[in-house]
């Protein structure tokens, strides 16, 4: 193709996108959604993903589609986001599917399982291996349409006061862990006891706790300075993949 012809065609494409974009925005009523997050604003690396989405949607629609993000606890507690979307309390949610394995254990695979796929492998499976399509009918049972919403990458296995050399060393430990039914089940299977720790807890609260081990979210570690509270770090080799989950009822009205 000649350079001049290429530029002409490219110009037509740009003109078309510029013409049709505003027409969609100007001809549509303003839509306002509430998105409940499972995360506090203080964890901006995770919570911020929802704000980025909201800003992009607003920009792409000329301000006609507004999404307001609410941190955990503002509308519903962090572990009730899926219920809030399912019941129509909010139009959308930003959460992690493995928080809800009590509803369906298969939801863990939509987020992560210990020693499972890496972030790249998970994304490859979701976008190119049929993962998103595989989970659509599962989420449809909860009146939800799911979309991948970011990934933390590899998480660590926890901060320990004493060195852990084998699974036997976990027996009898008191482990404070992020609120996750799957994490609770795994820790108890190793012979340890698990108590929940809020993502919004301060390092002072943790330092004063009776637990011997901390199992926080990846993005929480540096902010709360866990390395100053526990000496030993175990590598866990799994990660958190979050989800944007709009209600099917609201999505069909767009």
Image (cartoon, helix red, strand yellow):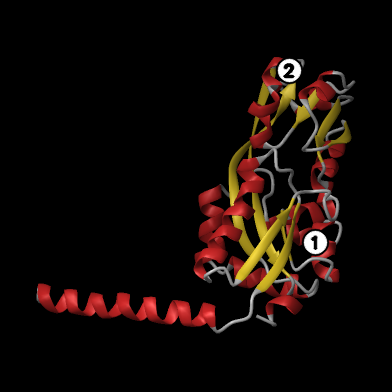
Number of marks:
2
Do we see residue 59 in this rendering?
Answer: yes
Q: Which mark is residue 82?
A: 1
The quarter of the displayed image where residue 92 is located? bottom right
Q: Which mark is residue 230?
A: 2
Q: Residues within 10 Å of mark 2 (few under 14, many from 20)?
A: some
Q: Residue at x 69, y 18 (%)?
A: 232
Q: Nearer the viewer, mark 2 or mark 1?
A: 1
Does 242 sit above or below residue 170? below
Q: Measured from the top left, where is residue 43 in percent x and y?
A: 67, 39
252 and 241: which is toward the camera: 252
Does 208 sit above or below residue 140? above
The CA distance from mark 2 to mark 1 is 33 Å
Does 29 sit above or below residue 41? below
Q: Is residue 197 left or right of residue 247?
A: right
48 and 208: which is toward the camera: 48
Do we see residue 1 in this rendering?
Answer: no
Q: Measured from the top left, where is residue 183 in percent x and y?
A: 80, 42
**Most distant residue in the front direction:** 26
Q: Residue at x 53, y 71 (%)?
A: 61
Quarter of the image with the N terminus in it: bottom left
The quarter of the displayed image where residue 80 is located? bottom right
Q: What kind of element bears circle 1?
A: helix
Q: Measured from the top left, where is residue 138 in percent x and y?
A: 74, 71
């Amino acid at each position: 193709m000649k350079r001049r012809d290429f530029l002409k065609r490219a110009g037509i494409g740009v003109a078309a996108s510029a013409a049709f974009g505003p027409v969609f925005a100007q001809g549509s009523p303003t839509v306002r959604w509430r998105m409940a997050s499972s995360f506090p604003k203080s964890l901006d690396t995770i919570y911020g993903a929802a704000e980025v989405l909201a800003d992009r949607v607003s920009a792409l629609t000329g301000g006609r589609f507004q999404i307001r993000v609410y941190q955990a606890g503002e509308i519903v507690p962090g572990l009730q986001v899926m219920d809030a979307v399912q019941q129509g309390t909010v139009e959308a949610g930003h959460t992690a599917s493995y928080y809800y394995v009590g509803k369906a254990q298969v939801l863990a695979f939509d987020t992560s399982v210990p020693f499972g796929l890496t972030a790249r492998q998970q994304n490859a499976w979701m976008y190119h291996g049929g993962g998103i399509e595989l989970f659509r009918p599962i989420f449809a049972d909860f009146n939800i349409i799911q979309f991948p919403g970011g990934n933390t990458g590899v998480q660590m296995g926890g901060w320990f006061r004493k060195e852990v050399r084998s699974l036997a060393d976990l027996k009898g430990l008191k482990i404070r862990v992020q609120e996750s039914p799957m994490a609770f089940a795994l820790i108890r299977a190793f012979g340890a006891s698990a108590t929940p720790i809020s993502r919004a807890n301060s390092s002072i609260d943790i330092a004063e706790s009776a637990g011997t081990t901390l199992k926080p979210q990846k993005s929480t570690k540096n902010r709360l300075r866990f390395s100053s509270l526990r000496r030993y770090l175990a590598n866990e080799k799994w990660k958190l993949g979050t989800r944007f989950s709009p209600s099917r009822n609201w999505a069909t009205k767009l």
